């Protein structure tokens, strides 16, 4: 595998414009002079801004806000809340993938498998056993972690591109299993949520508000756990492995256990997201296990900004909204009346998203968050230089 | 016995399809380190191009089949060249971004095929001879298997001859072995990159036309479904090894057929298990360079 060792070095050498989060942070921290204050400010700004955002998101179902063109209706209506909850779920899912790809540098093409394990696992446990919701969730989580540990241990025997292909193959096997066993999983049809043991407050369109809050709580939980992992010793070793595996080995540490830990943490959290996904949609379709879905998660993470937690969150929200609005656009009358040359591409949301993704990879390396940071830095830099000029 | 023969020949025929996709993937990866997710789209586009040709010709003649193979190969090669020049070339040595770009391209093109040709499969018919069977060792073998095997062998020989006997082939082989050394000797490897993409695209295009003959239809998902097995084949065979890809294609497809028949449709799972087993024993694949 001589070729697989090139990515870490090439990352450092050829990409001055790289905007991977930690990478950028460490550079900033390393530049001397006056940075200590801005760093403490930054460290304060993040939680405060997060808290304000959390409060706004939490009271959203109680307000009557309309954002035409972005949301389908006022924020208290179940349809809008369902979409918003889906946004939050996608943000959580993107965060779990951030643990693998963003922090540890593991390019997995099988992450959707764990979402599917969560959703299908919980659905099957609820349907087949008389367990209540919480015990069923615990059983599913244990199962999911077992699957992740087993498959992660095998796939981490290879690295780089081979790892990507192996995880893809495992996810494909999962997808085949789901489609081929209709008596257990509902096959091509969806697996509906068995509601006998689910609290009434989480069932039905009327209670979409509660599900929205559950999704919000999940996002906060995942964000806290992912941040914790990222700042832990294991997280640091994982990030170091991403940047230069050889150097980690030379320092006397073994990357494998840390990579496996990151894999299991990311997959386990994805299992939890999958369970909430089942509750929110009161069912699950085999689409969530497909290779396309994994690629979607990848698109979300890169779109938001690779290597940054907030990038994953922003990416998840923006992607879900875009997907929804583009689907609405595709079936709108304006598009129907266009000539075929324009109508065909515009009526395919995935074509537009794929093209957007290619453009982001080519021209906006840091994704949306990177773009935002660069714009902010640009403004600050200009202000700084004019101040210098005045002095 | 006759069932076994039929399964084996069918397996080899399917293996020929896998090889047509995997050969390009493996060459591209070996030389450039690019995992090309859009390879399935080259195949699908080749298949649709072939279908468009045979639809316009009087259906069912050998001429139309040969012509659609040629057009499929040409379209596959052209799209591959365009991909290399417009997207991959900007991102040399940035392997993760290259993968991401091809992922985006794959998503976008499949959706575009949906829009142009519809999500439903279009049905393809070939020369009547292909639907007939002949007896081999007591088994009735459909003739399309022979076509698949024949074309795949021809493509394999063609690529091997190209790599052995031409200057480009020499550069490519040397580049797979040690690219920085070739560059250091003052040879422009970039041209070789484009050539490799063109070869891979042409092979995929041919594979697309043959796949549409074999399955009897073309759908936007055709390429993606074959691509996953081609990935498995490339990993099992060893990334960058053409011979490894050929052997692994046969092994995977035959095993898949046997498992599907004797173990009630578990072919896909058995293939994944084989992949896991190979990785546990030999992480670099059958013919891959030692790690």
Image: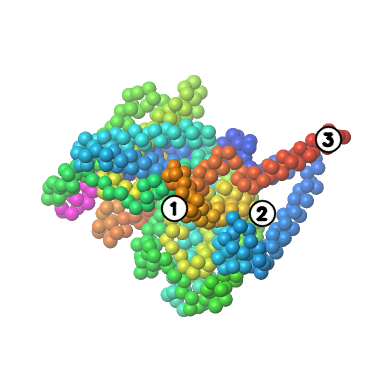
Q: Is residue B158 visible?
A: yes
Magenta region: which residues?
B1-13
Dot 2: chain letter: A
Looking at the image, which residue sits at the far right? A391
> Observer-nearest residue: B148 or A77?
A77
| CA–CA distance in space, label 2 to label 1 | 31 Å
The colour style of the image is rainbow
Residue lying farthest top?
B186
- Residue holding disc 3: A388
Circle number at residue A213: none
Q: Are marks 2 and 1 on the same chain?
A: yes
Spatial CA distance of label 3 from label 2 is 36 Å
Residue A24 horizontal/vertical position (percent): 67, 43
Residue at position x 67%, y 67% from top?
A: A63
**Disc 3 secondary structure class:** helix
Residue where numbered disc 1 is placed:
A291
At 51% across and 48% down in the image, what residue appears? A353
Q: Residue at x 65, y 58 (%)?
A: A228
Q: Is residue B177 above or below residue A26?
A: above
Mark 3 or 1 closer to N-term? 1
Asked whether the residues under marks 3 and 2 belong to the same chain, the reply is yes
For numbered disc 1, what is the local secondary structure?
helix
Residue tagged by mark 2? A231
Q: Secondary structure at mark 2?
A: helix
């Amino acid at each position: 595998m001589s070729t697989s060792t090139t990515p870490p070095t090439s990352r450092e050498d050829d990409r001055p414009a790289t905007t991977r989060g930690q990478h950028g942070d460490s550079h900033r921290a390393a530049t001397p002079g006056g940075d200590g204050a801005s760093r403490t400010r930054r460290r304060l700004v993040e939680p405060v801004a997060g808290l304000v955002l959390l409060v706004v998101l939490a009271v959203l179902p109680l307000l009557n806000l309309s954002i035409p063109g972005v949301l389908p209706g006022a924020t208290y209506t179940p349809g809008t809340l369902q979409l918003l909850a889906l946004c939050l779920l996608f943000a959580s899912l993107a965060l779990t993938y951030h643990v693998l790809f963003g922090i540890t540098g593991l390019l997995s093409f099988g992450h959707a498998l764990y979402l599917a394990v969560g959703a299908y696992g919980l659905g099957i446990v609820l349907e087949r056993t008389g367990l209540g919701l919480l015990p069923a969730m615990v059983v599913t989580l244990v199962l999911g972690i077992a699957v992740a540990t087993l498959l992660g241990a095998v796939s981490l025997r290879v690295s780089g591109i081979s790892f990507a292909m192996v995880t893809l193959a495992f996810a494909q096997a999962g997808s085949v299993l789901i489609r081929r066993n209709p008596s257990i999983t509902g096959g091509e049809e969806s697996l509906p949520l068995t509601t006998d043991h689910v609290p009434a407050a989480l069932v039905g369109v009327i209670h979409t508000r509660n599900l929205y809050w559950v999704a919000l709580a999940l996002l906060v939980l995942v964000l806290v756990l992912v941040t914790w992992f990222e700042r832990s010793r294991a997280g640091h070793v994982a990030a170091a492995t991403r940047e230069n595996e050889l150097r980690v080995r030379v320092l006397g540490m073994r990357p494998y256990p840390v990579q496996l830990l990151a894999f299991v943490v990311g997959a386990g959290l994805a299992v939890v997201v999958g369970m909430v996904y089942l509750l929110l949609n009161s069912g699950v379709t085999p689409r969530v296990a497909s290779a396309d879905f994994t690629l979607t998660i990848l698109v979300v993470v890169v779109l938001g900004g690779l290597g940054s937690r907030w990038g994953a969150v922003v990416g998840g929200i923006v992607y879900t909204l875009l997907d929804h609005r583009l689907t609405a656009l595709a079936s709108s009358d304006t598009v129907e009346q266009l000539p075929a040359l324009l109508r065909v591409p515009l009526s395919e949301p995935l074509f537009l998203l794929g093209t957007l993704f290619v453009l982001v990879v080519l021209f906006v390396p840091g994704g949306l968050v990177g773009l935002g940071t660069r714009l902010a830095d640009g403004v600050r830099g200009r202000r700084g230089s004019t101040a210098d000029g005045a002095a | 016995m006759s069932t076994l023969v039929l399964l084996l020949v069918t397996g080899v025929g399917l293996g020929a399809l896998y090889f047509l996709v995997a050969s390009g993937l493996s060459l591209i990866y070996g030389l450039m380190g690019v995992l090309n997710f859009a390879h399935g789209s080259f195949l699908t586009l080749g298949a649709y191009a072939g279908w468009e040709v045979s639809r316009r010709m009087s259906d069912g003649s050998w001429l139309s089949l040969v012509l659609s193979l040629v057009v499929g190969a040409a379209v596959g090669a052209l799209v591959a060249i365009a991909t290399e020049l417009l997207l991959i070339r900007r991102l040399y040595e940035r392997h993760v971004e290259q993968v991401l770009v091809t992922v985006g391209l794959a998503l976008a093109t499949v959706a575009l095929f949906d829009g142009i040709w519809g999500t439903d499969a279009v049905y393809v018919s070939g020369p009547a001879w292909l639907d007939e069977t002949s007896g081999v060792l007591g088994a009735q073998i459909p003739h399309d298997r022979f076509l698949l095997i024949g074309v795949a062998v021809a493509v394999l020989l063609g690529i091997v001859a190209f790599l052995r006997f031409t200057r480009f082939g020499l550069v490519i082989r040397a580049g797979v072995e040690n690219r920085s050394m070739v560059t250091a000797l003052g040879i422009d490897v970039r041209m070789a990159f484009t050539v490799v993409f063109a070869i891979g695209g042409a092979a995929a295009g041919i594979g697309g036309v043959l796949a549409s003959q074999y399955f009897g239809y073309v759908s936007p998902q055709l390429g993606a479904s074959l691509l996953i097995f081609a990935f498995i084949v490339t990993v099992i065979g060893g990334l960058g090894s053409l011979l490894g890809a050929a052997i692994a294609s046969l092994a995977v497809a035959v095993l898949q057929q046997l498992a599907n028949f004797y173990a009630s449709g578990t072919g896909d799972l058995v293939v994944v298990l084989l992949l896991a087993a190979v990785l546990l024993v030999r992480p670099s694949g059958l013919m891959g360079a030692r790690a």
